[in-house]
Amino acid sequence: MFDDRLEKINEECGVFGIFAPGRSVSELIYLGLFSLQHRGQEGCGIAVSEGKAINHYKNLGMVTDVFNQSTLDSLNGYLGIGHVRYSTSGQSKTQQNTQPIVARFQHGQIALAHNGSLTNAAELRNHLMERGSLFHTTIDSEQIVGLIASHGQDDMEQAMLKAMIDLKGSYSLVIMTENKLYAVRDPYGNRPLCLGKIGEDGYVVASESCALDAIGATFLRDVEPGEILTIDENGLHSTKLFNHEKNALCIFEFIYIARPDSNIDGINVNKARRLMGRELAKEAPLDVDTVIAVPDSGTTAAIGYAEESGIPYTQGILKNRYTGRSFIMPTQEMREQMVKLKLNPIRDALEGKRIAVVDDSIVRGTTSRKLVKLLREYGAKEVHMLISAPPVKYPCFYGVDTGNPDELIASKKSVDEICEYIGADSLHYLSMEGILRAVEWSGCGFCTACLSGEYPMGTPNYDNVKAALE
Ligand code: AMP
Protein backbone atom coordinates (compact mmCIF):
# COMPACT_ATOMS: atom_id res chain seq x y z
CA MET A 1 0.00 0.00 0.00
CA PHE A 2 2.71 2.42 1.03
CA ASP A 3 4.70 1.64 -2.11
CA ASP A 4 1.66 2.43 -4.20
CA ARG A 5 1.29 5.75 -2.52
CA LEU A 6 4.96 6.50 -2.65
CA GLU A 7 4.76 6.06 -6.41
CA LYS A 8 1.97 8.56 -6.50
CA ILE A 9 4.22 11.43 -5.49
CA ASN A 10 6.39 10.88 -8.54
CA GLU A 11 5.28 12.74 -11.62
CA GLU A 12 6.57 14.00 -14.88
CA CYS A 13 4.80 17.08 -16.11
CA GLY A 14 5.01 19.96 -18.52
CA VAL A 15 4.06 23.58 -17.92
CA PHE A 16 3.36 26.48 -20.24
CA GLY A 17 2.45 30.14 -19.66
CA ILE A 18 1.82 33.10 -21.95
CA PHE A 19 1.17 36.84 -21.64
CA ALA A 20 0.30 38.34 -25.03
CA PRO A 21 -1.67 41.61 -24.95
CA GLY A 22 -4.18 41.91 -27.77
CA ARG A 23 -4.12 38.20 -28.62
CA SER A 24 -6.36 35.30 -27.71
CA VAL A 25 -4.03 32.77 -26.09
CA SER A 26 -6.05 29.57 -25.57
CA GLU A 27 -5.09 28.10 -28.96
CA LEU A 28 -1.43 29.03 -28.43
CA ILE A 29 -1.49 27.27 -25.05
CA TYR A 30 -3.11 24.25 -26.73
CA LEU A 31 -0.26 24.13 -29.27
CA GLY A 32 2.34 24.58 -26.53
CA LEU A 33 0.84 21.74 -24.48
CA PHE A 34 0.62 19.55 -27.57
CA SER A 35 4.38 19.88 -28.03
CA LEU A 36 4.93 19.08 -24.34
CA GLN A 37 2.66 16.02 -24.52
CA HIS A 38 5.66 13.67 -24.13
CA ARG A 39 6.05 15.02 -20.55
CA GLY A 40 2.63 13.83 -19.44
CA GLN A 41 -0.25 12.01 -21.06
CA GLU A 42 -2.67 11.43 -18.26
CA GLY A 43 -4.40 14.76 -17.91
CA CYS A 44 -4.15 18.38 -18.98
CA GLY A 45 -5.68 21.77 -18.46
CA ILE A 46 -5.70 25.42 -19.47
CA ALA A 47 -6.53 28.53 -17.41
CA VAL A 48 -6.89 31.96 -19.04
CA SER A 49 -7.89 35.49 -18.10
CA GLU A 50 -8.95 38.53 -20.06
CA GLY A 51 -7.77 40.73 -17.15
CA LYS A 52 -10.66 40.38 -14.72
CA ALA A 53 -11.42 36.71 -14.05
CA ILE A 54 -9.71 33.36 -14.46
CA ASN A 55 -11.58 30.78 -16.51
CA HIS A 56 -10.32 27.22 -16.82
CA TYR A 57 -10.93 23.78 -18.25
CA LYS A 58 -9.11 20.55 -17.37
CA ASN A 59 -9.68 16.84 -17.58
CA LEU A 60 -8.07 13.42 -17.80
CA GLY A 61 -6.72 12.54 -21.24
CA MET A 62 -4.32 13.73 -23.91
CA VAL A 63 -4.38 17.32 -25.14
CA THR A 64 -6.27 16.47 -28.35
CA ASP A 65 -8.85 14.41 -26.39
CA VAL A 66 -9.51 17.00 -23.70
CA PHE A 67 -9.76 20.10 -25.89
CA ASN A 68 -11.78 20.81 -29.01
CA GLN A 69 -12.60 24.03 -30.83
CA SER A 70 -15.60 24.80 -28.66
CA THR A 71 -13.72 24.35 -25.33
CA LEU A 72 -10.93 26.55 -26.68
CA ASP A 73 -13.43 29.16 -27.90
CA SER A 74 -14.93 29.30 -24.42
CA LEU A 75 -11.53 30.20 -22.93
CA ASN A 76 -11.06 33.89 -23.68
CA GLY A 77 -8.00 35.75 -22.53
CA TYR A 78 -4.70 37.41 -23.35
CA LEU A 79 -2.84 35.60 -20.58
CA GLY A 80 -2.96 32.03 -19.44
CA ILE A 81 -1.20 28.91 -18.27
CA GLY A 82 -1.40 25.20 -19.11
CA HIS A 83 -0.27 21.85 -17.78
CA VAL A 84 0.20 18.27 -18.98
CA ARG A 85 0.42 15.62 -16.30
CA TYR A 86 1.61 12.09 -15.89
CA SER A 87 1.27 10.24 -12.63
CA THR A 88 1.70 6.62 -11.89
CA SER A 89 -1.07 4.95 -9.99
CA GLY A 90 -4.38 4.62 -8.24
CA GLN A 91 -6.04 7.58 -6.67
CA SER A 92 -4.04 10.14 -8.55
CA LYS A 93 -5.86 9.34 -11.78
CA THR A 94 -8.75 11.61 -10.97
CA GLN A 95 -9.98 14.73 -12.69
CA GLN A 96 -9.54 16.57 -9.38
CA ASN A 97 -5.77 16.02 -9.44
CA THR A 98 -5.33 17.58 -12.87
CA GLN A 99 -3.86 21.08 -13.13
CA PRO A 100 -3.86 24.10 -13.25
CA ILE A 101 -5.10 24.37 -9.69
CA VAL A 102 -7.45 27.37 -9.53
CA ALA A 103 -8.33 28.98 -6.20
CA ARG A 104 -9.36 32.23 -4.55
CA PHE A 105 -7.31 34.10 -1.91
CA GLN A 106 -6.90 37.63 -0.50
CA HIS A 107 -5.71 39.10 -3.81
CA GLY A 108 -8.46 37.48 -5.89
CA GLN A 109 -7.97 34.44 -8.10
CA ILE A 110 -4.81 32.41 -8.58
CA ALA A 111 -4.01 29.52 -10.95
CA LEU A 112 -0.89 27.39 -10.68
CA ALA A 113 0.75 24.61 -12.71
CA HIS A 114 3.70 22.66 -11.31
CA ASN A 115 6.40 20.38 -12.68
CA GLY A 116 8.46 18.65 -10.02
CA SER A 117 7.91 17.09 -6.62
CA LEU A 118 8.23 18.55 -3.13
CA THR A 119 10.19 16.57 -0.55
CA ASN A 120 8.39 18.20 2.39
CA ALA A 121 4.89 17.87 0.93
CA ALA A 122 3.52 15.95 3.92
CA GLU A 123 4.94 18.35 6.51
CA LEU A 124 3.63 21.36 4.58
CA ARG A 125 0.17 19.84 4.25
CA ASN A 126 0.03 19.06 7.96
CA HIS A 127 1.24 22.56 8.81
CA LEU A 128 -1.33 24.22 6.56
CA MET A 129 -4.16 21.95 7.74
CA GLU A 130 -3.38 22.77 11.37
CA ARG A 131 -3.90 26.41 10.41
CA GLY A 132 -7.28 25.61 8.90
CA SER A 133 -6.48 25.17 5.20
CA LEU A 134 -8.79 22.93 3.21
CA PHE A 135 -7.51 20.77 0.36
CA HIS A 136 -9.36 19.59 -2.72
CA THR A 137 -6.67 17.37 -4.25
CA THR A 138 -4.04 14.88 -3.11
CA ILE A 139 -1.20 16.49 -5.07
CA ASP A 140 1.70 18.37 -3.53
CA SER A 141 1.17 21.35 -5.87
CA GLU A 142 -1.82 22.40 -3.79
CA GLN A 143 0.51 23.03 -0.84
CA ILE A 144 2.30 25.66 -2.96
CA VAL A 145 -0.98 27.49 -3.55
CA GLY A 146 -1.76 27.16 0.18
CA LEU A 147 1.63 28.54 1.20
CA ILE A 148 1.36 31.53 -1.16
CA ALA A 149 -2.16 32.21 0.15
CA SER A 150 -0.91 32.01 3.74
CA HIS A 151 1.23 35.06 2.95
CA GLY A 152 -1.73 36.86 1.36
CA GLN A 153 -1.12 39.99 3.47
CA ASP A 154 2.01 40.57 1.31
CA ASP A 155 2.11 41.44 -2.38
CA MET A 156 2.34 38.44 -4.74
CA GLU A 157 6.11 38.57 -5.26
CA GLN A 158 6.75 38.76 -1.53
CA ALA A 159 4.26 35.96 -0.91
CA MET A 160 6.00 33.76 -3.46
CA LEU A 161 9.45 34.54 -2.05
CA LYS A 162 8.26 33.67 1.45
CA ALA A 163 6.67 30.47 0.13
CA MET A 164 9.95 29.52 -1.56
CA ILE A 165 11.73 29.66 1.78
CA ASP A 166 9.48 26.84 3.03
CA LEU A 167 9.34 24.78 -0.17
CA LYS A 168 11.80 21.89 -0.34
CA GLY A 169 12.37 19.77 -3.40
CA SER A 170 11.79 20.38 -7.04
CA TYR A 171 9.49 22.89 -8.71
CA SER A 172 9.16 24.73 -11.96
CA LEU A 173 5.97 26.76 -11.74
CA VAL A 174 3.77 28.91 -13.90
CA ILE A 175 1.34 30.97 -11.86
CA MET A 176 -1.23 33.55 -12.87
CA THR A 177 -3.57 36.00 -11.25
CA GLU A 178 -6.29 37.80 -13.21
CA ASN A 179 -3.75 40.13 -14.86
CA LYS A 180 -0.22 38.87 -14.21
CA LEU A 181 1.85 35.86 -15.19
CA TYR A 182 4.65 34.49 -12.98
CA ALA A 183 7.32 31.88 -13.63
CA VAL A 184 9.27 30.36 -10.74
CA ARG A 185 12.16 27.88 -10.79
CA ASP A 186 13.41 26.18 -7.66
CA PRO A 187 16.80 27.29 -6.26
CA TYR A 188 18.56 24.22 -7.66
CA GLY A 189 17.02 24.59 -11.12
CA ASN A 190 16.11 20.91 -10.98
CA ARG A 191 13.40 20.93 -13.63
CA PRO A 192 13.74 22.96 -16.82
CA LEU A 193 11.90 26.22 -17.52
CA CYS A 194 12.63 28.67 -20.31
CA LEU A 195 11.49 32.10 -21.41
CA GLY A 196 10.61 33.32 -24.90
CA LYS A 197 9.22 36.35 -26.64
CA ILE A 198 6.16 36.44 -28.86
CA GLY A 199 5.19 39.49 -30.92
CA GLU A 200 6.05 43.04 -29.80
CA ASP A 201 5.28 42.80 -26.11
CA GLY A 202 4.34 39.19 -25.42
CA TYR A 203 6.22 36.61 -23.30
CA VAL A 204 6.04 32.84 -23.07
CA VAL A 205 7.41 30.41 -20.48
CA ALA A 206 7.60 26.67 -21.05
CA SER A 207 9.16 23.50 -19.68
CA GLU A 208 11.00 22.97 -22.96
CA SER A 209 12.03 25.24 -25.81
CA CYS A 210 10.26 22.96 -28.34
CA ALA A 211 6.99 24.50 -27.06
CA LEU A 212 8.28 27.98 -27.96
CA ASP A 213 9.15 26.77 -31.45
CA ALA A 214 5.63 25.34 -31.83
CA ILE A 215 3.99 28.75 -31.49
CA GLY A 216 6.61 30.80 -33.34
CA ALA A 217 8.05 32.39 -30.18
CA THR A 218 11.73 33.32 -29.94
CA PHE A 219 13.84 31.76 -27.19
CA LEU A 220 15.25 34.45 -24.85
CA ARG A 221 16.86 32.52 -21.99
CA ASP A 222 16.30 29.89 -19.31
CA VAL A 223 14.59 30.97 -16.11
CA GLU A 224 17.40 30.98 -13.56
CA PRO A 225 17.47 28.73 -10.50
CA GLY A 226 15.75 30.55 -7.63
CA GLU A 227 14.30 33.21 -9.94
CA ILE A 228 10.77 34.64 -9.97
CA LEU A 229 9.70 36.30 -13.21
CA THR A 230 6.75 38.65 -13.15
CA ILE A 231 5.15 39.50 -16.48
CA ASP A 232 2.43 42.15 -16.75
CA GLU A 233 1.50 45.31 -18.67
CA ASN A 234 4.81 46.86 -17.48
CA GLY A 235 6.83 44.11 -19.14
CA LEU A 236 9.20 41.61 -17.56
CA HIS A 237 10.57 41.88 -14.02
CA SER A 238 12.95 39.49 -12.29
CA THR A 239 13.47 38.82 -8.57
CA LYS A 240 16.02 36.42 -7.19
CA LEU A 241 16.48 35.49 -3.61
CA PHE A 242 18.52 32.34 -3.74
CA ASN A 243 21.97 31.81 -5.13
CA HIS A 244 23.41 28.32 -5.05
CA GLU A 245 26.95 27.73 -6.13
CA LYS A 246 25.99 24.65 -8.14
CA ASN A 247 22.58 23.94 -9.53
CA ALA A 248 21.18 20.43 -9.78
CA LEU A 249 19.58 20.08 -13.19
CA CYS A 250 17.93 16.66 -13.64
CA ILE A 251 20.20 14.44 -15.73
CA PHE A 252 17.24 12.21 -16.63
CA GLU A 253 15.86 15.08 -18.76
CA PHE A 254 18.83 14.41 -21.06
CA ILE A 255 18.64 10.62 -20.77
CA TYR A 256 14.94 10.18 -21.45
CA ILE A 257 12.40 12.89 -20.69
CA ALA A 258 13.05 15.91 -22.90
CA ARG A 259 12.64 16.11 -26.67
CA PRO A 260 15.89 16.10 -28.69
CA ASP A 261 14.88 19.38 -30.38
CA SER A 262 14.80 21.19 -27.01
CA ASN A 263 17.61 23.19 -25.40
CA ILE A 264 17.84 23.16 -21.61
CA ASP A 265 20.23 25.48 -19.78
CA GLY A 266 22.37 25.84 -22.89
CA ILE A 267 22.47 22.12 -23.68
CA ASN A 268 20.82 20.81 -26.80
CA VAL A 269 19.21 17.49 -25.84
CA ASN A 270 20.07 15.91 -29.20
CA LYS A 271 23.72 16.86 -28.76
CA ALA A 272 23.82 15.47 -25.20
CA ARG A 273 22.32 12.15 -26.32
CA ARG A 274 24.65 11.83 -29.30
CA LEU A 275 27.62 12.48 -27.02
CA MET A 276 26.33 9.81 -24.62
CA GLY A 277 26.29 7.38 -27.56
CA ARG A 278 29.82 8.42 -28.53
CA GLU A 279 31.08 7.94 -24.97
CA LEU A 280 29.44 4.51 -24.91
CA ALA A 281 31.26 3.56 -28.13
CA LYS A 282 34.57 4.48 -26.48
CA GLU A 283 33.75 2.53 -23.32
CA ALA A 284 32.11 -0.50 -24.91
CA PRO A 285 33.49 -1.22 -28.40
CA LEU A 286 31.75 -4.20 -30.02
CA ASP A 287 32.43 -6.44 -32.97
CA VAL A 288 28.97 -6.31 -34.56
CA ASP A 289 27.49 -5.79 -38.04
CA THR A 290 25.02 -3.05 -37.27
CA VAL A 291 23.76 -0.65 -34.57
CA ILE A 292 20.03 -0.28 -34.06
CA ALA A 293 17.97 1.77 -31.60
CA VAL A 294 14.94 1.18 -29.43
CA PRO A 295 12.88 4.04 -30.86
CA ASP A 296 12.43 6.83 -30.03
CA SER A 297 14.30 7.18 -26.75
CA GLY A 298 17.40 5.25 -27.91
CA THR A 299 17.65 6.68 -31.42
CA THR A 300 19.93 9.67 -30.89
CA ALA A 301 22.41 7.78 -28.69
CA ALA A 302 22.48 4.92 -31.24
CA ILE A 303 23.42 7.43 -33.95
CA GLY A 304 26.21 8.73 -31.68
CA TYR A 305 27.46 5.16 -31.08
CA ALA A 306 27.48 4.51 -34.85
CA GLU A 307 29.31 7.80 -35.58
CA GLU A 308 32.06 7.07 -33.07
CA SER A 309 32.47 3.37 -33.84
CA GLY A 310 32.07 3.54 -37.62
CA ILE A 311 29.54 0.67 -37.44
CA PRO A 312 26.52 1.38 -39.69
CA TYR A 313 23.30 2.54 -38.02
CA THR A 314 20.18 0.80 -39.32
CA GLN A 315 16.51 1.12 -38.50
CA GLY A 316 15.94 -2.32 -36.98
CA ILE A 317 12.76 -1.75 -34.97
CA LEU A 318 9.65 0.11 -36.03
CA LYS A 319 7.68 2.01 -33.40
CA ASN A 320 3.93 2.27 -33.71
CA ARG A 321 3.33 5.95 -33.00
CA TYR A 322 -0.26 5.45 -31.92
CA THR A 323 0.26 3.40 -28.74
CA GLY A 324 0.17 6.07 -26.04
CA ARG A 325 -0.03 5.34 -22.35
CA SER A 326 -3.80 5.39 -22.56
CA PHE A 327 -3.81 2.66 -25.21
CA ILE A 328 -6.56 0.18 -24.37
CA MET A 329 -5.62 -3.49 -24.58
CA PRO A 330 -8.84 -5.49 -24.62
CA THR A 331 -7.46 -8.96 -23.82
CA GLN A 332 -4.72 -10.43 -21.63
CA GLU A 333 -3.11 -11.93 -24.71
CA MET A 334 -2.92 -8.50 -26.29
CA ARG A 335 -1.50 -7.01 -23.10
CA GLU A 336 1.28 -9.56 -23.23
CA GLN A 337 1.85 -8.60 -26.84
CA MET A 338 2.25 -4.93 -25.87
CA VAL A 339 5.96 -4.68 -26.62
CA LYS A 340 5.39 -6.19 -30.05
CA LEU A 341 2.43 -3.93 -30.72
CA LYS A 342 4.58 -0.96 -29.85
CA LEU A 343 7.98 -2.07 -31.15
CA ASN A 344 8.08 -4.46 -34.10
CA PRO A 345 11.48 -5.68 -35.39
CA ILE A 346 12.27 -5.37 -39.10
CA ARG A 347 13.40 -8.82 -40.28
CA ASP A 348 15.19 -7.50 -43.35
CA ALA A 349 17.53 -5.40 -41.17
CA LEU A 350 18.28 -8.17 -38.68
CA GLU A 351 18.46 -11.56 -40.38
CA GLY A 352 21.83 -13.26 -39.90
CA LYS A 353 23.37 -10.14 -38.31
CA ARG A 354 25.24 -9.45 -35.08
CA ILE A 355 23.28 -6.55 -33.58
CA ALA A 356 24.07 -3.84 -31.02
CA VAL A 357 20.78 -2.41 -29.74
CA VAL A 358 20.81 0.93 -27.91
CA ASP A 359 18.21 2.09 -25.38
CA ASP A 360 18.36 4.95 -22.88
CA SER A 361 17.51 2.97 -19.75
CA ILE A 362 16.35 -0.29 -18.24
CA VAL A 363 13.80 0.28 -15.51
CA ARG A 364 12.08 -3.01 -14.70
CA GLY A 365 13.71 -4.93 -17.54
CA THR A 366 10.39 -5.77 -19.22
CA THR A 367 11.09 -4.02 -22.51
CA SER A 368 14.67 -5.26 -22.95
CA ARG A 369 13.81 -8.87 -22.06
CA LYS A 370 10.95 -9.05 -24.57
CA LEU A 371 12.88 -7.15 -27.19
CA VAL A 372 15.99 -9.34 -27.05
CA LYS A 373 13.80 -12.42 -27.52
CA LEU A 374 11.96 -10.78 -30.43
CA LEU A 375 15.17 -9.68 -32.15
CA ARG A 376 16.42 -13.28 -32.06
CA GLU A 377 13.08 -14.54 -33.40
CA TYR A 378 13.46 -12.11 -36.28
CA GLY A 379 16.81 -13.59 -37.23
CA ALA A 380 19.47 -11.65 -35.26
CA LYS A 381 22.52 -13.90 -34.77
CA GLU A 382 23.81 -12.02 -31.71
CA VAL A 383 22.08 -9.34 -29.61
CA HIS A 384 24.25 -6.96 -27.55
CA MET A 385 22.35 -4.50 -25.36
CA LEU A 386 23.83 -1.02 -24.89
CA ILE A 387 22.38 1.47 -22.41
CA SER A 388 23.35 5.11 -22.92
CA ALA A 389 23.27 5.93 -19.18
CA PRO A 390 24.42 4.31 -15.92
CA PRO A 391 21.97 1.89 -14.22
CA VAL A 392 18.86 3.49 -12.69
CA LYS A 393 19.20 2.16 -9.13
CA TYR A 394 17.50 4.69 -6.90
CA PRO A 395 14.04 6.29 -6.78
CA CYS A 396 13.54 9.89 -7.82
CA PHE A 397 11.89 12.15 -5.25
CA TYR A 398 12.01 15.18 -7.52
CA GLY A 399 9.29 14.47 -10.04
CA VAL A 400 10.33 11.63 -12.34
CA ASP A 401 8.60 8.30 -12.30
CA THR A 402 11.50 5.90 -12.25
CA GLY A 403 9.47 3.34 -10.32
CA ASN A 404 9.87 2.40 -6.69
CA PRO A 405 13.08 0.72 -5.45
CA ASP A 406 11.58 -2.80 -5.40
CA GLU A 407 10.86 -2.57 -9.10
CA LEU A 408 14.20 -1.18 -10.25
CA ILE A 409 16.03 -4.20 -11.61
CA ALA A 410 19.46 -2.54 -11.24
CA SER A 411 18.93 -1.98 -7.53
CA LYS A 412 18.69 -5.73 -6.99
CA LYS A 413 20.79 -7.34 -9.71
CA SER A 414 24.36 -6.93 -10.99
CA VAL A 415 25.02 -6.06 -14.65
CA ASP A 416 25.80 -9.73 -15.38
CA GLU A 417 22.59 -10.84 -13.69
CA ILE A 418 20.55 -8.28 -15.65
CA CYS A 419 22.24 -9.47 -18.85
CA GLU A 420 21.22 -13.02 -18.04
CA TYR A 421 17.66 -11.92 -17.16
CA ILE A 422 17.15 -10.07 -20.45
CA GLY A 423 18.84 -12.88 -22.39
CA ALA A 424 21.37 -10.70 -24.26
CA ASP A 425 24.82 -11.84 -25.47
CA SER A 426 26.29 -8.87 -23.59
CA LEU A 427 25.07 -5.80 -21.72
CA HIS A 428 26.96 -2.53 -21.28
CA TYR A 429 25.89 0.62 -19.47
CA LEU A 430 27.55 4.02 -19.90
CA SER A 431 29.64 4.90 -16.81
CA MET A 432 28.91 7.87 -14.56
CA GLU A 433 32.11 9.56 -15.78
CA GLY A 434 30.97 8.95 -19.37
CA ILE A 435 27.54 10.51 -18.95
CA LEU A 436 28.98 13.51 -17.11
CA ARG A 437 31.50 14.02 -19.94
CA ALA A 438 28.52 14.23 -22.32
CA VAL A 439 26.89 17.12 -20.44
CA GLU A 440 29.36 18.76 -18.04
CA TRP A 441 30.99 20.94 -20.71
CA SER A 442 27.90 23.16 -20.25
CA GLY A 443 29.09 24.31 -16.81
CA CYS A 444 25.80 23.15 -15.23
CA GLY A 445 25.60 21.10 -12.06
CA PHE A 446 23.43 17.99 -12.30
CA CYS A 447 21.18 15.94 -10.08
CA THR A 448 22.19 12.30 -10.62
CA ALA A 449 20.14 10.90 -7.72
CA CYS A 450 18.48 8.08 -9.70
CA LEU A 451 21.93 6.86 -10.78
CA SER A 452 24.12 7.70 -7.76
CA GLY A 453 21.76 7.74 -4.78
CA GLU A 454 23.06 11.24 -3.93
CA TYR A 455 20.11 13.55 -3.35
CA PRO A 456 21.21 17.21 -3.61
CA MET A 457 17.86 18.49 -2.33
CA GLY A 458 17.38 15.87 0.39
CA THR A 459 14.75 13.15 0.55
CA PRO A 460 11.28 13.12 2.06
CA ASN A 461 10.98 12.04 5.65
CA TYR A 462 9.48 8.60 5.06
CA ASP A 463 7.77 8.45 8.44
CA ASN A 464 6.07 11.76 7.86
CA VAL A 465 5.07 10.83 4.33
CA LYS A 466 3.66 7.56 5.59
CA ALA A 467 1.82 9.16 8.50
CA ALA A 468 0.32 11.87 6.32
CA LEU A 469 -0.97 9.38 3.80
CA GLU A 470 -2.55 6.98 6.28
P1 AMP B 1 11.38 -1.28 -18.53
O1 AMP B 1 10.64 -2.03 -19.58
O2 AMP B 1 10.58 -1.22 -17.24
O3 AMP B 1 12.77 -1.77 -18.30
O4 AMP B 1 11.48 0.22 -18.99
C1 AMP B 1 12.47 0.60 -19.92
C2 AMP B 1 11.87 1.45 -21.00
O5 AMP B 1 11.07 2.50 -20.44
C3 AMP B 1 12.97 2.10 -21.83
O6 AMP B 1 12.71 1.84 -23.19
C4 AMP B 1 12.88 3.57 -21.49
O7 AMP B 1 13.03 4.38 -22.65
C5 AMP B 1 11.50 3.77 -20.90
N1 AMP B 1 11.54 4.67 -19.74
C6 AMP B 1 12.58 5.04 -18.97
N2 AMP B 1 12.20 5.87 -17.98
C7 AMP B 1 10.88 6.04 -18.10
C8 AMP B 1 9.91 6.81 -17.38
N3 AMP B 1 10.26 7.56 -16.34
N4 AMP B 1 8.62 6.74 -17.80
C9 AMP B 1 8.27 5.98 -18.85
N5 AMP B 1 9.15 5.24 -19.58
C10 AMP B 1 10.44 5.25 -19.22
Image (cartoon, grey):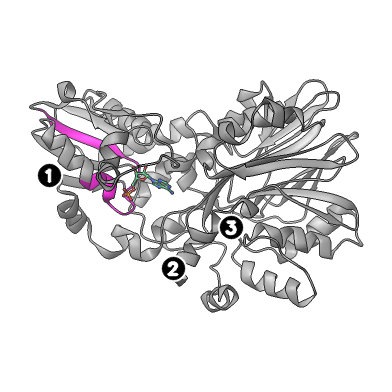
**Where does the C terminus fall, quadrant-wise?**
bottom right
Label 3, secondary structure: give it. Answer: loop
State the mark number for residue 3.
2
- Circle 1 sits on which residue? 425
Give the secondary structure at mark 2. Answer: helix
* Mark earlier in primary sequence (2, 3): 2
Q: How many marks?
A: 3
314 relative to 80 in the view: left or right: left
Residue type, label 3:
Ser
Taking the spot 44% from the left edge, 31% from the top edge, the residue there is 271
Residue 45 sits in which quadrant? top right
Q: CA separation, marks 1 and 2? A: 34 Å
Which callout, 1 or 3, points at the residue further toward the start of the chain? 3
Instruction: Please give the range of residues in magenta.
Output: 353-369
Q: Quick one: label 2, few (<14), some, or many (20+) residues within 10 Å? A: few
Q: Is residue 300 above or below residue 1?
A: above
In the displayed structure, does residue 332 sit left or right of residue 199? left
Element type where label 1 sits in the image: loop
Nearer-N-terminus badge (1/2): 2
Q: Residue at x 64, y 28 (%)?
A: 68
The residue at label 1 has a CB less than 8 Å from ligand 1: no
Label 2 is placed on what type of residue? Asp
Report, in whole angstroms, how far the alpha carbon at label 1 lies from the one at label 3.
Answer: 38 Å
**Mark 1 nearby-residue class (10 Å; few <14, some 14–19, many ≥20):** some
Residue 142 shown in magenta: no
- Disc 2, disc 3: CB below 8 Å? no
Q: Which residue is mark 3?
A: 117
**Where does residue 406 sit, x and y in percent of width and height?**
34, 65
Q: Position of residue 415 (x, y in %)?
A: 22, 56
Going 18% across and 23% down the picture, which residue do you hit?
349
Q: Position of residue 185 (x, y in %)?
A: 68, 49
Residue 445 visible somewhere in the drawing: no
